[in-house]
Image: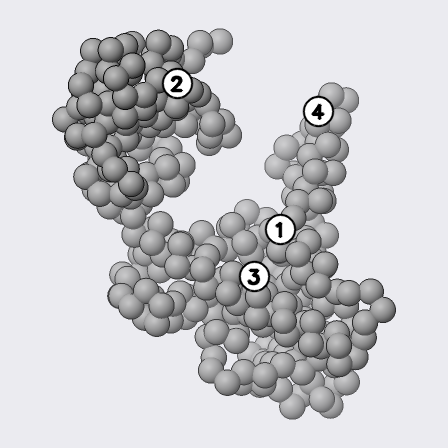
Amino acid sequence: MLIATHDGTFHADETVACAVLSYVFDNTSVIRTRNPIELEKADIIIDVSGKNDNRHFDHHSKEFTLSRDNGIRYATAGLMWLKFGKDFLKKIALELIKTHYEDDIIDAAFKRIDHEIMCMVDLNDNGQLNEFLENKIAPKTAEGRNVFNALNEFYQIDPGIPYIVAMQNLPAVSGHEQDKAFMQTVKMLKQILQNASINALNTEFGIKEVLKVYDGGKILIMHTRLPWTQAVLSHFDVFKNCVLAVYPDRKRGWRVQSLPLSKASRFANRCGAPLTWRGLDGQSLDKASGLNGTIFVHKAGFTGGALSFETNLEMAKLWLKLGEYPVEN
């Protein structure tokens, strides 16, 4: 697979696109040029040429209008993910995870990567971030406009993929040295996308398992480690009655943890631990709680744990009864 893209300064959208293509297809190579004759020697031409068909993908052309349902226009990164993302994920599953996932897991992981990575790359490359936020937030007061402007300024220096790629364009470097930097950046992004895809597939599979075990009550009880916070954030309405999660700890024993208050307030608790438990561990926590075999409660009150499942579940039930709930406005 011979890939062609433009030379000169490189950006997140074509480097991410090349990272996708270089994993989906074996034995890929990249040429960087604006010479139409050289471009046409490639199997696929991205981010240059002014054409769009089965070989050419240039979102800069006047005729190109493809957008997502949320209004974010596709740039080259999103285009290549749209066309090859599911193939990328299936290859990840087969070669790196060594398992087979059903189509619903592949579809969900595809959407997760598009939302968490490709949308931000495309927004940045299209210069659409201000417009997108304007449509989404639509400030109507001077105070609201100040908040909007502050958020915009903050997002401009967010050290995400566009910023990282921009920093790979070294000053006073051109020609062969710049092409070398380009390929090093593609290699780095390929590794990032591989790891992100592994996480996305495992997360979506885990979310499906969480939804299977949740019974609709106040406590989500899991006997294996699952990505329950992602399940809650992805299906907030399903967990509207849930307050605490119980799950096995990574190192020893079991954990209790409050669910997040809202999608925006992920570090606010639906129910914080009783004030008298916070910051205690071992025997001092046993004494304060009246339980036997507790491990700790974090001083911020969002999580704690015990050695056995039974004690941990009792801790959760007492937590519900004695814990600190947010004050309703």
Q: Identify the disc placed on residue 160.
A: 1
User: Residues under labels 2 and 1: Cα distance?
Assistant: 35 Å
Q: Earlier in the sequence, mark 2 or mark 3?
A: 3
Q: Earlier in the sequence, mark 4 or mark 1?
A: 4
Q: Is there CB contact under 8 Å for labels 4 and 1?
A: no
Is 235 situated left or right of 214 in this image? right
Q: Residue at x 41, y 70 (%)?
A: 87
**Residue 254 sits above or below residue 171 on the image:** above
Residue 173 lies in quadrant: bottom right
**Which residue corresponds to mark 3?**
78
Q: Earlier in the sequence, mark 3 or mark 1?
A: 3
Q: Is there CB contact under 8 Å for labels 4 and 3?
A: no
- Closer to the eye: label 2 or 1: 2
Q: Position of residue 63 (x, y in %)?
A: 69, 67
Q: Identify the disc placed on residue 279.
A: 2
Q: Residue furthest front?
A: 283
**Residue 316 sits above or below residue 288 on the image:** below
Q: Earlier in the sequence, mark 2 or mark 4?
A: 4
User: Residues under labels 3 and 1: Cα distance?
Assistant: 16 Å
**Residue 51 seen in the current view:** no
The kind of residue tagged 3 is Gly
User: Residues under labels 4 and 3: Cα distance?
Assistant: 31 Å
Q: Position of residue 90 (x, y in %)?
A: 36, 68
Q: Position of residue 253 (x, y in %)?
A: 23, 34
User: Residues under labels 2 and 4: Cα distance?
Assistant: 39 Å
Q: Earlier in the sequence, mark 4 or mark 3?
A: 3
The kind of residue tagged 1 is Gly
Q: Residue at x 68, y 72 (%)?
A: 182
